[in-house]
Each structure stands twice: as structure tokens, then as C-alpha cells.
Amino acid sequence: MTIRTRILLSFLIPGMLLTGIGAGTFYAYSVINLRIDTVHSLDTTIRSRAGHIETYLASMKGRMADFSSDGLISECLYTINAGTAGCLPDQLSQHLRVNKLPVVKELDRVAVVDMRGKIIASTLESEIGTDMSGEEFFTNARSVPMIFEPTDVTDDSIVYTVTSPILFQKEFQGFIVASYIPDKLYSILADRTGLGKTGETYLVNTEGLMASPSAYFSSLAYHQRINTESSQDCFSGVSVAQEDSDADNSQFQIIHEYTNYRNIDVFGVHAYIDSMKWCVLAEIEKTETSSTSSELGWFLTFLSLGIDLAVFIIAFVLGKKISAPIIALERGAEIIAKGHLEHRVGTKSPDEIGALSRTFDKMTDAIRHSHVRITPHPEDTHEPQDTKSER
């Protein structure tokens, strides 16, 4: 094995080992961090969505509370319930159409229900006189504003009902009832921030039905049943802490891995919306993180090959530079060995090899001078013959 090859291997083998070990370690560490980042991103996303939803629902309830506290409405309803003169249902309906319905653009209609459950005024004239006493709000919403999910969804139009009790001099008189289209609510869920390319968020109600549109299929709201590990965990009230996020002791969830309603393997987390008894789920496909891991793996592979190639080139150049004077010295020694003592191999290089080559020249000079002293001069060899002939 030549010295150039030895130098090349002495650089290349450790370099390949170091890059291989380094790339492998970095890849494993990055995959772990990618999973942790996915958990943190989903957890942050679900907290944000849940907070926005709670705020939106509270604003809708607050708006209905404002409507129900309207003095004209409460006083007019009181006079109608009491059967006294002073306010006509048509006047109240006009007030709702002009001063209430336009205030909130999501509203589809606004009505006033008396204490017997009859609609006495409405922005929809056709429903005046309808009996609402069998509705859930009539028995369950007499103290605070409440929002109710649709009971029958037959098309793409989803309408929620929000109610608030109407009081006059602190006595219950009836309800303000509004129907609203939850486009703004669903736009919160449609926000893809923090969800990558394949993620989505959606609502699940206590009946296990998807309570919001799917990001991938239409007409699934209130038709698609959800029974995943994440939804089960959410409704069972299980909260598994993984790690502290900051000084306020808020905690990250353990990420769930399961097959979702689309038969896709996903990572998922959840949050509970107490005011509606909803679970909001955030999911991202496993293939997205796997794809990122694969891209990282290929990047590290090509990076390692690039580093190995650079090490090879550097080792080759250094090996050639180091071995060149040694090879020249070797060839010079072969020439001198053939009797050409006048040949010189010395270089001006200041390193040890240069010093060795100059020392080799000195040794050659010494050999040449010794050879000259030992070898007799031609004139000296002829003189005795001449003397003998004269005799």
C-alpha cells in the first residue's frame, strides 16, 4: 500500500464514520423533536381554537342578553302578557326588524316568545302564533342566555338557536329567540394556522356527531359519527399531562395516534368546550410528519455524501502533496543506485522531507568524493610501465 493511499484512507475512513454517526444521531434527534413540535403545535392550535370559540359563543349570548334587556321589548311583552293596552305585536315585530336583526349579520331571524310559549312578534311574519312550549329552551333557559344546536339537519344549511330570558321588574316574561347561521364559528375552525398541509379541526357533540363541516367532505355536519380515541378521552374527562409549558403550570396533552373518520392515520389532540358540551379536535396526518422525516433523511444523506467527497478531495490533495517529494526521493535514490552520483534530489522545502532530501544529497556527495579518492588516476597506473620499459 502506497503512502498516498494510506494518507487517503486515514482521512477518508474516520471522516465517513464521523459523518455517518453524526448524521444518524442528528436524524434521530430531529425526528424526536419533530414529533414534539407536532404535539406542541397541535396543542397550541387547539387551545387557540377553543379560546376563540368560547369567546364567540359568549359574544352571541351577550348580544342576546342585550336584546332581552331592551326596555321597549320587556315593557311591551309585559303589557301583552298582562292583556293591557299600550303595545301591539306588530309594533314589536317592526322593532325587531329595524333595530335588532341588522345588528348581527349572522342572524337569520329574531322573535319574542311570551311566557306561554307563543311567538308574539318576529322578523318572520309567518311564524307569529307558533307554539314553542315544547322546545328545549322553554324549560331549560329561563335564567341565562343559552345556545342550542339544530335538532334536524337535512341540508347544508345549519342554523343554531340562541335565547335569553326577558325580565320586567325582575319577573320572567318570556324569551328573545334568534336563529343564527354559524359561518363565523366555522371560519374559526377552518383556519389552518398550525395545522400544516393536512390538518383540520372540527367539533363533536355529546351524541358523538360531528358538529361542524369537514375540511374534506361536504354535508358531514350532524351526520358523521365520531368515535376516536381523542374524542373518547375528551368526553370521559381524562386529562393526561405530559410536561409543563410555562410558569403558570398549564400542561400539554399526550398526543393520540388513531385512525380518524376518513380512515387516515393521524396525530390528534382535543379541548373541551364546557358551555356547549362540545369537544374540539385537531388532527394532522401521520404522513405529513413522515414526509418531513423522509425529506430530512435524504437531505442528511446527500449532506454526508458531500462531506465525504470533500474529505476525499482534501485527503487526495494532501496525500499527493505529502507523497510527491517522497516519491521523488525514491526515484532519485534509484537513479543514484545505478551509479549516477551527480544526480541531486534535494528540495528547498523547509519540512522534514526537504531536510531528508538535502541530507541525501550530502550523503551522495560524500560517496562520490570517497569514490574519487579510492579510484586511481589513469596517469598513475601507466607510470610504472614506462619506467620498466626504459630499463
Image (cartoon, helix red, strand yellow):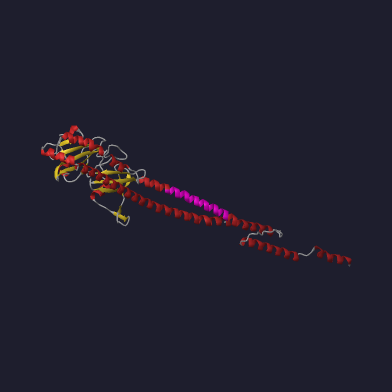
Q: Nearer the viewer, residue 139 or 40?
A: 139
Apparent side of residue 288 relative to residue 134 in the rendered image (left or right): right
Q: Residue furthest bottom?
A: 391
Q: Residue at x 27, y 48 (%)?
A: 271
**Is residue 314 visible from the viewing direction of this image?**
yes
Would you say residue 27 sits in the magenta stretch?
Answer: no
- In the image, is residue 302 part of the stretch drawn in magenta? yes
Q: Quadrant of the C terminus?
A: bottom right
Whether residue 231 sits left or right of residue 14 in the image: it is left
Instruction: Name the residue furthest top.
Output: 126
Q: Main secondary structure of the magenta part?
A: helix
In this image, 270 relative to 18: left or right? left
* Image x and y of residue 122, in percent: 19, 35
Q: Is residue 293 left or right of residue 7?
A: left
Residue range in magenta is: 296-318
Residue 251: image location, x then y, percent: 30, 54
Residue 354 lies, in percent from the top left, at: 63, 60
Q: Residue furthest right?
A: 391
